Amino acid sequence: MLRVTWENWSGTVAVTPAEVACPRDVEEVVEVVRRAGRAGRQVTAVGSGHSFTPLAEARDVQLRLDHLTGIVAVEPGGRVRVRAGTRLRELSALLARHGLALENLGDIDAQTVAGAVATGTHGTGARFGGLATQVAALELVTGDGRLLRLGEGAGPPVEGVVVGLGALGVVTEVTLRCVPAFTLHAVEDTERYDAVLESLDERVERHDHVEFYWFPYTDRCLTKTNTRRPGPPERPLPRWRRVLEDEVLSNGVYRAVNEVGRRRPRAVPALNRLAARALSRREYDDVSSRVFATTRRVRFVESEYAVPRESLVPVLGALRAWVAAHPEAAVQFPVEVRFAAADDVWLSTAYRRPTAYVAVHQFHRSPAADYFHAVEAIAAEHGGRPHWGKLHGLDATALTARYPRLPEVLALREELDPQRVLTNRHLRRLLGE
């Protein structure tokens, strides 16, 4: 047992738990939870700290799964059992040794498997779901200390538990449906905002993975279009160019630009125009995990809403209008737009509707509250569902209106954690007592 101060990646949460437990195996996880239950204490499992919200804020017992890593088994048909504390980037490397890959992946791969699944982490692609849709089975420790394996008819439905926010059990193992390893042909370019929207439906349907970034105070977007291909990469990006563009420019120089914008907010529009002009077209092939994920060293805060696909254009229009009318907001980061297929995961942001994601960011040392509140209000007019790991101000009442299966999740919570061992202040706001 250790006692340390813990801070998440963005710096939005800092807490000193009363106790930190680092179990070496599943049996020790069970014992930690049972002991806490007997003593009337609360347990909060933490991953890599990449959630911007206080989901992992542990004021009592912090449970770290750093020792529960690696692949347990590769099963026929591409199913892979992986321990909960495995980072996504580590998992991609391990899968590659077996000729496998994750079907889809977000643009950050520092999260643990359990944390990414529990918060509804997603990538982009109108025919693909988030990471939770790739889960076939789960092993978890319930709040009353039972070890359950869910899937294939056993226990509560996986789709009801998989995006569980840490409130339905401590996930110790995940079984993922993986696919044969594949290459992505990547095309990145800058285009006019109006041209992107005019061709958006056609390009989203024609290509496997599409996303774009609008630079506030400009009419320019960075577009990223990734197409799946079998076999090894034919035209990988030269190492010198990857280092120059992804490390030196996108991280080192961009950090300096944001520091200037923080000190001189009136310069932000000009800095955004400069950043948009500095981007150049690039086209290359690489293994899927290296194209999906990017290195993010410039710290930021983020809010993201999932809206119906058909609502994307009016949402972006309202957002652009607000930014233009509020120059004091000095929005430094581009607005990110991604897509996902409808799914049946109860607390998924894409539950039962084809989805567009609108993510807004701000440099972590710059004011963001007014901007994020405005985006929340715009999204609310279109039934926007907040990403569980990103900043929002909604409570249990508001969330029930956005997530139609939330009452059933709460019923599962009564079954799996009747004493509320697995809770904290943030979960009480999201789910009630």
Image (cartoon, rainbow, N blue to C red):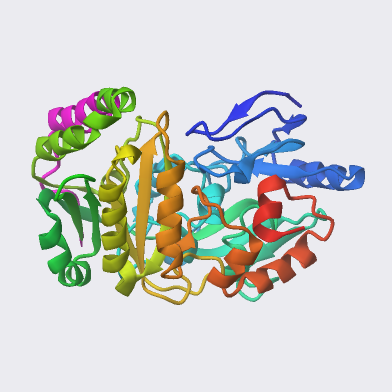
Q: In the image, what residue occupies the spot 53% across and 37% down?
A: 48
* Residue closer to the observer: 30 or 360: 360
| Percent of width and height locating residue 156 | 68, 71
| Percent of width and height locating residue 296 | 34, 35
* Residue closer to the observer: 200 or 368: 368
Count of numbered labels shown in the rendering? 0
- Please provide the residue range marked out in magenta: 228-255
Quarter of the rendering occupied by the C terminus: bottom right
Q: Main secondary structure of the magenta part?
A: helix
Q: Give the left or right position of residue 353, taking residue 287 as reference.
A: right
Q: Give the left or right position of residue 426, taking residue 234 as reference.
A: right
Quarter of the rendering occupied by the N terminus: top right
Which of the 4 image quadrants contains residue 266?
top left
Q: In the image, what residue occupies the spot 65% across and 52% down?
A: 166
Q: In the image, what residue occupies the spot 61% across and 46% down?
A: 55
Residue 333 in the image: above or below residue 305: above
Residue 333 in the image: above or below residue 379: above
- Can you see residue 75? no
Give yes or no for residue 74 being in the magenta stretch: no
* Residue closer to the observer: 349 or 102: 349
Q: In the image, what residue occupies the spot 33% across and 71% down?
A: 311
| Percent of width and height locating residue 81 | 54, 55
Q: Give the left or right position of residue 323, taking residue 386 as reference.
A: left
Which of the 4 image quadrants contains residue 241?
top left
Residue 33 in the image: above or below residue 410: above
- Can you see residue 131? yes
| Percent of width and height locating residue 53 | 55, 44
Residue 340 in the image: above or below residue 97: below
The furthest residue to the front = 325
Q: Give the left or right position of residue 195, taking residue 126 as reference.
A: left
* Residue closer to the observer: 288 or 187: 187
